[in-house]
Image (cartoon, rainbow, N blue to C red):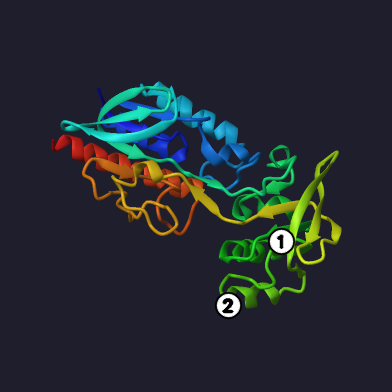
Amino acid sequence: MHDIIVVGGGPAGMTAALYALRNGKSVLVIEKESFGGQMTQSPKIENYPGKLQVSGMELADEMMNQILEQGADIEIETVAGVSRDGEGWIVATEEGGAYKAKSVVIATGVKHRMLGLPGEDDLVGDGISYCAVCDGDFYTDKVVCVVGGGNSALQDAILLAEKCKEVIMLLRRQVFRGEEKLQEVLLSHTNVSTRMDVVISSVIAGSNGLEAVEIANRTTGEKQRVDCDGLFVAIGLVPENGAFAELADLNDWGYFDSDESCTTKTPGIFVAGDCRNKEIRQITTATADGAVAALAACRYIDML
């Protein structure tokens, strides 16, 4: 039995493991895909303290090596559920694993909702981005498109309008869904234009990455090529917390309904990172959650 099992190997999960290990606890980290989570899609990170510039993959490798040096155990499996086992917990995986722990930190993260177009995966980090805060500086004085009409898309576009030569909004509907105030701020920029009632039908790659998108009018079906240097996709995030709904309350959008304490309605179960209800989702806020959740789990174990 481990003291703590961490579900998820992103920055929140690895930070939770680090803090628990440094508090003398044994830790198993279970990750279903690759360590690092969403940050591995960023070719260049310039807003992580202490790093002038680092790729997401490099930062993930450094975090992973750090917890391995501290003695973390690792399994690459998909967690199917967590259930009570006496005074502890059993974490079951789809591969048939059953791992025991005194406490569990769930740091499953989220996934950006993608367009689902052929070639999209190949252009992530090479013209297609899901984070204007992370990647906006790379498109200074360039032309970008932003797809989405909610608050996130509006906020991304406002940030980009301050840096980019031109920002082209691509909306599926004929109106924005976001707050009117954000709309006013965005449309006050003279370098912002809007194409409404359209969908992106394809992404067009060139020798240097993305060079254009093809849009189709939803009413007429008419197609048009829009040349751009970058495409920012802001059509929502997808949490994957359903397997833990009996242990931790979920809000209307499927995020863990937990505050900055990272606690849940179930003693011994803690949550951390982007999977939690929060306003800002960045690597730094994920690592902060990881530290909070791990220390809370350590206190819980010490009181058993």
Residue at the image position 86 percent from the left and 38 percent from the top:
207
Residue 47 visible from this viewpoint: yes
Q: Which label lies toward us, 2 or 1? A: 2
Where 155 falls versus 121 (above or below)? Answer: below
Q: Quadrant of the N terminus?
A: top left
Query: Judging from the image, what secondary structure is the residue with disc 2 in?
Result: helix
Residue 258 located left or right of residue 117? left
Give me the residue at 26% from left, 29% from top.
Answer: 101
Identify residue type, mark 2.
Lys
Q: Residue 122 location, x and y as percent?
A: 72, 37
Residue 125 makes an appearance in the image: no
Say the numbered circle drawn on residue 181. 2
**Residue receiving disc 1:** 163
Of the residues shown, which amino acid type is indicated by label 1?
Answer: Lys
Q: Which mark is residue 148?
A: none
Label 2 – label 1 distance at C-alpha? 20 Å
